[in-house]
Image: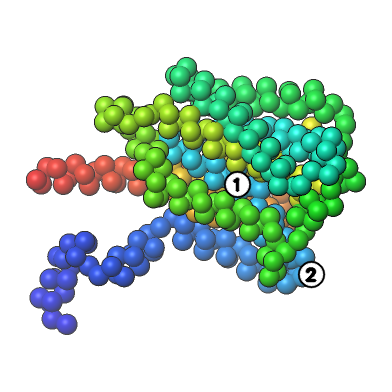
């Protein structure tokens, strides 16, 4: 190829490049790929140190099953964060709906498990509606509101459950089997989580209301001036987050078979961390559910894999913290670079 040919190729507009080339370049620049590679390296390192981590009797099952609940919470958190908000109440919603699931089965022993999923999801959506209404109509920062409802919802669980415990013997056998059943070596709960994550991701990328969530998070004031239903979209984001947390509570009961008042404590911070590590900008307007899902898998895998390679618990937590800080710094750097390019393009025009 002559120098002239090379120069001509470099001057071609990105939109004029072949579709396959553009897709490859976008993939190589994607945060999801980077996080996915880190996840793969962690799994490989743990498997080399202890082959049972992946190839043991329960290794593969646990590798997929353990992050299933966090996948749902990370997906819901993504929907809220892209609107420039955050939901810190999802852990308490999970605990409340997990206990509710057990109580419903105790009161109705012959109830089909599908009704438990519907009841838990509806209850979570109702609690999310409370968050959304106060945030959107009260114009109060979501961090403050959801921190408050986190304690309120947890207080309801503690008052309701007390020191009691719902054991596996009080839950239907068919419901508990969902926590261990597999389809072609894939745990059912993992498949359910992947389907839900896929549906949420499809909604965000294809539905008009889903794309409007990104517009709201990118510039709320501009979204209002443009005529977008900002209040409705914010409320809807919290309702969806609550519904997914409610569904996660039902899966929690199926996965572990026992529920007490502390179920889900602290998992809300893991959900936020998974979304941020997966490329969801904490300042809103960008990120994908797929990245958050991979981030959830990475965080859960780190907690189970690093002890096998001889890393202490302190350094495990430090590594997670470093990942979060690095993700936020990277987002700010990329945002500043993009803003600089836009200014340069405007000045050139």
Q: Residues within 10 Å of mark 2 (few under 14, many from 20)?
A: few
* Mark with earlier residue (1, 2): 2
Q: Look at the image and tell me in which quarter the N terminus lies.
A: bottom left
The residue at which mark 1 appears reads as 72
Report the front residue among 69 and 38: 69
Q: Report whether 68 appears left or right of 257.
A: left
- x 57%, y 51%: residue: 196
Image quadrant in which you'd find residue 329: top left
Say which element carries label 1. helix
Report the front residue among 123 and 253: 123
In the rendered image, the residue lying farthest to the right is: 169
- x 21%, y 61%: residue: 15
- Residue 182, horizontal then vertical, whole percent: 72, 64
- Residue 119, horizontal then vertical, whole percent: 68, 37
Chosen colour scheme: rainbow
Say which element carries label 2. loop
Q: Residues within 10 Å of mark 1 (few under 14, many from 20)?
A: many
- x 65%, y 52%: residue: 68
Mark seen at residue 217: none
Report the front residue among 81 and 324: 81
In the depicted structure, whether residue 309 falls above or below residue 257: below
Q: Is residue 343 visible?
A: yes
The residue at which mark 2 appears reads as 57
- x 45%, y 19%: residue: 137
Q: Report whether 190 appears left or right of 173.
A: left
Number of numbered discs on residues = 2
In the depicted structure, whether residue 17 falls above or below residue 332: below
In the depicted structure, whether residue 319 falls above or below residue 96: below
């Amino acid at each position: 190829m002559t120098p002239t040919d090379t120069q001509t190729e470099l001057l071609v507009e990105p939109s004029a490049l072949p579709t396959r080339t553009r897709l490859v370049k976008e993939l190589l620049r994607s945060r999801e790929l980077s996080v996915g590679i880190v996840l793969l390296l962690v799994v490989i390192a743990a498997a080399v140190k202890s082959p049972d981590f992946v190839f043991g009797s329960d290794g593969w099952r646990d590798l997929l099953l353990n992050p299933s609940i966090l996948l749902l919470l990370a997906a819901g958190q993504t929907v809220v964060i892209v609107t420039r908000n955050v939901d810190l109440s999802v852990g308490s919603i999970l605990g409340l709906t997990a206990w509710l699931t057990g109580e419903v089965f105790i009161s109705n022993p012959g109830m089909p498990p599908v009704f438990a999923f519907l009841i838990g999801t509806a209850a979570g959506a109702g609690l999310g509606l409370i968050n959304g209404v106060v945030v959107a109509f009260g114009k109060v920062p979501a961090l403050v509101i959801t921190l408050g409802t986190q304690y309120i919802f947890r207080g309801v669980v503690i008052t309701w459950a007390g020191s009691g415990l719902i054991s596996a013997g009080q839950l239907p056998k068919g419901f508990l089997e969902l926590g261990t059943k597999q389809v072609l070596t894939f745990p059912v709960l993992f498949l359910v989580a992947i389907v839900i994550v896929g549906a949420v991701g499809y909604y965000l990328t294809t539905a008009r209301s889903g794309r409007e969530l990104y517009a709201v998070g990118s510039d709320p004031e501009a979204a209002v001036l443009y005529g977008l239903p900002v209040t409705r979209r914010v409320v809807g984001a919290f309702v969806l987050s609550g519904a997914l947390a409610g569904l996660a509570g039902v899966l929690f009961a199926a996965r572990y078979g026992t529920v007490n008042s502390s179920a889900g404590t602290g998992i809300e911070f893991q959900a936020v961390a998974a979304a941020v590590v997966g490329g969801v900008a904490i300042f809103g307007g960008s990120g994908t559910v797929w990245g958050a899902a991979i981030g959830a898998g990475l965080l859960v895998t780190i907690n189970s894999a690093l002890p096998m390679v001889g890393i202490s618990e302190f350094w495990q937590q430090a590594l997670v913290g470093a990942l979060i800080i690095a993700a936020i710094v990277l987002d700010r750097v990329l945002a500043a670079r993009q803003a600089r390019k836009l200014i340069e393009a405007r000045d050139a025009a």
